[in-house]
Amino acid sequence: MNTARQRLAILGSTGSVGTSTLDVVARHPERFEVVGLTSYQRTELLVQQCLQFRPRVAVVPTPERAAEVRAALKAAGSATEVQHGAQALCDLAGADDVHSVMASIVGAAGLPPCMAAARAGKRLLLANKEALVVGGALFMQAVKQGGATLLPIDSEHSAIFQCLPEDRSTWARRIDHIILTASGGPFRQRDPATLHAVTPAQAVAHPNWVMGRKISVDSATMMNKALEVIEARWLFDLAPENIRVVIHPQSIIHSMVVCRDGSVLAQLGTPDMKVPIAYGLSFPERIESGAPRLDFLQMQALHFETPDPQRFPGLQLAWEALRGPTGSTAVLNAANEVAVAAFLDGTIGFTAIHTLNARTIERLEPRLHPDHTLEDLIALDTEARAVAQELMQELAA
């Protein structure tokens, strides 16, 4: 076994996945060394993390925030260098002294640093599903050309990965289809006719998982599952029709592989992100995660349901976007980020999220060249956001 410590950069260290990652890392100081941490807005927590883990560099979005963090760290005697901006994120992700990158930035903003890590051949622990939703084939090409090791961290995709052999060349011969499980969120049994009255506070109150506000709203609409369908298409090289979704409200089975012989392989565990995080950090070994153990004697019955298209109309957009022109999934993601932000700030209602997503895809048909670049995708993302903003004004009027 390699006894050298794994040198780790955590992109989005103050979010739910980032803090869980540091919790696992703290349990294994002999295995991991934190080289870099990044945060978008939780400055005080970032300072605390830097003082505890002593990274070489910390990255924040703006010069003003960098000055604030720099002053706090200097006052505490920390030698951590503070940088700012999107390029600093990419520089950290591709840095020579970084072995592994935990990519847990939320949204399309995570694509450029994920691309940088992939091109630099890093061990890339992917919790940023938008890198694949937006990047698709271009991102997977960067992984292959850079010789990166891509390890899924989303609980559903980690579950699928754990059910499959390490030899990826055998996957196509084994898999009939995969089943992604969904909790159903806080509105699984709510009358669809009342969803227009949902408040942001209600939407972020997930019954099983502790997550950030944006992903919690996505879970409530099941757009999170739509994005995971798109992510699974690229991670496992599956046709869209070979990816299915069922609601499993207990969140004990995290996803399943249905094999060609009819066997079903499933990964089970308590709903705690530290399990897939620990697996990604230690792959192909397994280490203590700190998550509570699953007690079968105390476990309630497991239930499964078909997603209600009236309650969760956005889920079907995943397959529609995958079958659409190249770039359609990027348009969907951009529209959804605009829509969720508008819902959280009270500009539009809950059911308008789906309306805005669907209308943006109808309005904007991407025309990406077959050999498109990262810059082309960023330009499409920008255009889609502008279209979504325009449509949002119409909805809010």
Image (tube, rainbow, N blue to C red):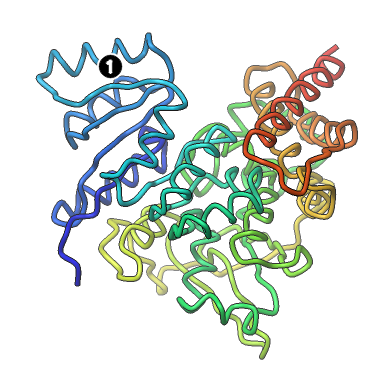
Q: Nearer the viewer, residue 310 or 245?
A: 245
Residue 160 lies in quadrant: bottom right
In this image, 178 relative to 127: left or right?
right
**Looking at the rendering, in which quadrant would you find the C terminus?**
top right
Relative to residue 336, is residue 33 depicted above or below?
A: below
Q: Secondary structure at mark 1?
A: helix
> Could you say where residue 239 lies in the image, as x and y percent from the top left?
75, 66
Q: Position of residue 194 (x, y in %)?
A: 79, 34
At horizontal 36% and vertical 31% (from top left) the residue drawn is 38
For residue 79, side relative to residue 291 (left or right): left
Q: Which residue is most to the right? A: 362
- Residue in front for this viewpoint, 234 or 221: 234
Residue type marked 1: Val
In the displayed orientation, state which residue is furthest to the bottom.
261
How crowded pointer 1 is (Cα within 10 Å; few <14, some 14-19, many 20+) is rated as many
Q: Tell me: residue 169, above or below residue 371.
A: below
From the viewer's perspective, tell me whether residue 89 is left or right of residue 186: left
* Quadrant of the frame with the N terminus: bottom left
In the displayed structure, 85 sits above or below 215; it is: above
Say above or below: 201 vs 113: above
Instruction: Looking at the picture, tell me which residue is in the foreground, 7 or 213.
Output: 7
Q: Which image quadrant for residue 123? A: bottom left
Number of numbered callouts drawn:
1
Instruction: Tell me the quarter of the picture where residue 48 sits.
Output: top left
Q: Residue at x 83, y 39 (%)?
A: 367
Q: From the viewer's side, name the closer residue of 252 and 378.
A: 378
Q: Please name the residue that numbered disc 1 is placed on.
A: 69
Where does residue 18 sit, x and y in percent of width and height?
37, 40
